[in-house]
Image: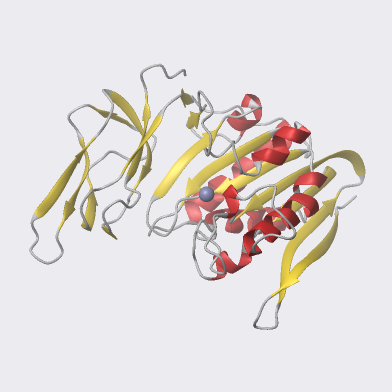
């Protein structure tokens, strides 16, 4: 009655240091027939919380029988992951802008082609786990083509991009190229990151993915209905225009921030002067990405993301 676990290593090239360029998948097959669910993380190598969520999912599935098949891709960009980098160190490209890839292209394009062939072409549902980096912390879920599935993860803030812009997560040259062509449900989760204990986020991530699997009837049991959720249609990213210690004054993630409130300020670690005060962009906003500790930033680094509550639906 238990699932069958197979580790699948797909070699797509090699490295100058003599090691193989490999994508490592776990194929988990249940006794009953059903669809194939793909769960991936660390497409951006410095967003590693999702990899931890997949580790705990792998452990949880040792004792939870599934229907169909689950393919885990815990580290989509191993070289970037190993160096805690957003881009692939070999060619400095953003993997999530190189899909569907090219087996004869640059290293990252070869990697994207391997992910397309070995993972995206083989799944019927895609759950892609992103997070903040080791600086900002993020908490929202994209609604793209399956709202109920996005909601079933259980986060309180969701984002429905409108209209789709070229170059956003679901367009252009992201994994969405293949998702769209194959017309399969896909959800991008943004959860965790920052210089804070990741365990609460990993626990939430595991709970969320298991609930999605219940919603998809891959595992038994009724899914927990989502909490009260806010769906925003617009998000603004705010970047400090000076460098220094970014000190957050905004309320916690998921909470409302109103015109006149400050998101944070940049303080010089040398003179202790306040170099910049960063206002919130909307009359009524909701916190989506923030710095939960005093972090050193350069001018133009990721500061905050705020969702527009005006026109949001609950
Ligand atoms: Zn990402």
In the picture, measured across the screen, residue 308 lies left or right of residue 42, that is left
Kindly indicate the quadrant of the structure image that contains residue 21.
bottom right
Q: Residue furthest bottom?
A: 18
Above or below: residue 55 compared with residue 225: below
Residue 260 appears at what percent x and percent y? 17, 29
The percent position of residue 62, horizontal first and vertical second, equals 77, 56
Farthest-out residue, front: 104
Residue at image x 31%, y 47%?
Answer: 303
Total residue callouts: 0
Q: Is residue 137 left or right of residue 167?
A: left
Residue 221 seen in this snapshot: no
Colour convention: secondary structure
Left or right of 15: which side holds 262? left
Image coordinates for residue 279, horizontal then vertical, percent: 21, 36
Task: Name the residue located 65 percent from the left edge and 27 percent from the top edge.
Answer: 145
State the residue at coordinates (55%, 50%): 203
Q: Is residue 288 visible?
A: yes
Looking at the image, is 57 positioned above or below residue 176?
Answer: below
Q: Position of residue 265 (x, y in %)?
A: 18, 48
């Amino acid at each position: 009655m238990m699932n069958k676990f197979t580790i699948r290593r797909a070699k797509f090239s090699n490295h100058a240091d003599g090691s193989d360029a490999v994508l490592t998948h776990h194929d988990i097959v249940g006794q009953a027939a059903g669809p194939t669910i793909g769960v991936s993380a660390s497409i951006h190598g410095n967003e590693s919380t999702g990899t931890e969520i997949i580790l705990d999912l792998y452990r949880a599935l040792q004792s939870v029988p599934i229907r169909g098949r689950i393919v885990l891709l815990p580290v989509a960009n191993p070289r970037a992951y190993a160096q805690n980098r957003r881009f692939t160190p070999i060619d400095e490209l953003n993997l999530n802008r190189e899909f569907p890839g090219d087996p004869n292209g640059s290293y990252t394009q070869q990697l994207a082609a391997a992910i397309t062939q070995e993972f995206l072409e083989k799944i019927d549902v895609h759950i892609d786990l992103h997070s903040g980096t080791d600086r900002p912390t993020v908490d929202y879920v994209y609604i793209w083509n399956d709202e109920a599935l996005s909601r079933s993860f259980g986060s309180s803030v969701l984002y429905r991009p409108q209209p789709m812009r070229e170059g956003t997560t679901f367009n252009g040259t992201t994994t969405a190229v293949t998702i769209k062509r194959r017309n399969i449900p896909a959800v991008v989760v943004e959860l965790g990151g920052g210089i804070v204990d990741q365990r609460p986020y990993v626990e939430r991530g595991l709970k969320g993915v298991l609930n999605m699997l219940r919603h998809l009837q891959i595992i038994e049991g009724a899914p927990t209905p989502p909490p009260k959720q806010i769906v925003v249609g617009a998000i603004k990213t705010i970047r400090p225009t000076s460098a220094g210690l970014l000190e957050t004054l905004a309320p916690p993630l998921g909470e409302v921030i109103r015109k006149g409130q400050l998101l944070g300020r940049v303080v010089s670690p040398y003179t202790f002067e306040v170099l910049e005060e960063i206002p919130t962009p909307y009359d009524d906003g909701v916190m989506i990405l923030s710095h939960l500790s005093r972090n050193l930033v350069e001018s133009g680094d990721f500061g905050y993301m705020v969702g527009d509550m005006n026109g949001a639906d609950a």
